[in-house]
Amino acid sequence: MTDQIETEPQAAQPADRTPRWYLQGEQTAPVMVLSGIWKARAGNIPVFPKDGLKKAPGAHLSFQTSDLQVWDTGLVAFLWDLKRVAHDAGVSLDMRTLPGPMRQLLELLPEVPDEPVHHKTARTSFLETVGNHAVASMTEVGVVSELGALTAKGAVLTLLGRSRMRMVDLLANTADAGPYALLIVGIVNFLIGAILAFVGAVELQKFAAGIYVASLVGIAMVREMAAVMTAIIMAGRTGGAYAARISTMQGNEEIDALNVFGIPTSTYLILPAVLSLIITMPFLYLYGCLIGMLGGFVVAISMLDITAAGYFHQTITAFHIGQFIFGFTKSLVFGAFIGLTSCRIGLKAGRSAADVGIAATRAVVVGIVGVIAIDAIFAVIADVLGI
């Protein structure tokens, strides 16, 4: 007696629209009967069990699709499960009994899914890591230097009237980096001057030398504090804004549009930003010096037995014009550095919303650290020149 394999058809829902399958025929040559509507969107595609062919090892499975009405990738996914189960059970499938389009799609799918490839992470040595960071840092220095050269060239062309920079952009950036920053620059420098005067007064009055508080505050503000604190403020306030603005334009593909039209970004975007900081930083430096001295004056007058005229006279005689020129030069360098690095960070940022925040944060960090590092270099130069 020939063994028969019979699987009960799945319970039918109204009419014959429900996707159904069952096995019938001999155990060595079973036939899978498919009927109904097999649409993935309907969400009722059955799952072929992993042990559905365990009773027919080595069999030759064919298909009967005469009652099949409508199908899509849902049926193909079901048959792919069947194909993998048949491979594990040693059952061969007769694809010729399937409709042509269905057979072509099913033949594209492997019997065994590819195993995921696990790539081993290559470990780099400490010296190699340091070398890679050094090379990347030097590359960035070169890129920023090239950007500065292109900006300088654009500035010369602007003076000759052949630049594509719009004056309205320069005026808008100058107003944002200058007058709109006076309040925060004034508050910070006033408090710095007051702190210096308070610390100096506590120590100097022990030696009956309270009058030299004016010299301490004046020299500290003119040589170091006014230029450095103003640059740090501008790095956090204006540098971060430049990086965020340019990275947003990068995400909106506005930079790509400028390149397509042949408009150089170094002239159209970077030049107004850098020039605005170069123009406003010296004036903010002088403003910070005056406000810082005013803060020291307020503290000295309230704590020490000093007259306003005496404080003013001691401040004037404490330093010479060379100190102002030195601080003025530092403010110019700080402004160019903040503008160039912030724009560079914005240009190399990604195109997502998160990259805008990352670019702004990186611009602030690089600006602050860079300002302090450049100030250290200026301190060495001042010592060599005897300033």
Image (cartoon, rainbow, N blue to C red):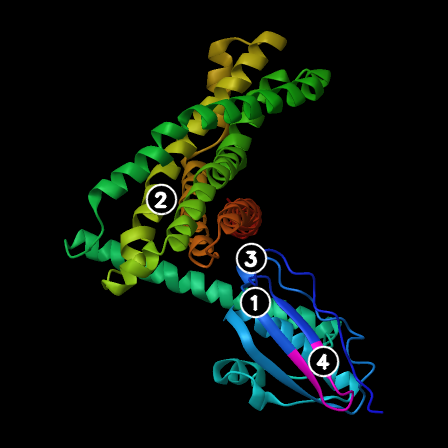
* As drawn, 163 above or below 317: below
> Residue 195 vs residue 227: left or right?
right
Report the Cα–Cα distance between label 2 and label 3: 66 Å
Residue 148 in the figure: left or right of residue 222: left
- The stretch of residues the image draws in magenta is 23-32
User: Which residue bears the numbered disc 3?
Assistant: 42
Residue type at numbered disc 2: Ile
Q: Earlier in the sequence, mark 2 or mark 3?
A: 3
Disc 3 versus disc 1: nearer the observer: 1
Q: Residue at x 40, y 26 (%)?
A: 182
Residue for badge 4: 24
Q: Earlier in the sequence, mark 4 or mark 3?
A: 4
Q: Amino acid at mark 4?
A: Gln
x then y, percent, for residue 244: 44, 45
**Which residue is disc 2 drawn over?**
278
The answer to whether residue 316 shows anywhere in this view is no
The reply to whether callout 3 and callout 1 are in contact (CB within 8 Å) is no
Q: Position of residue 94 (x, y in %)?
A: 63, 90
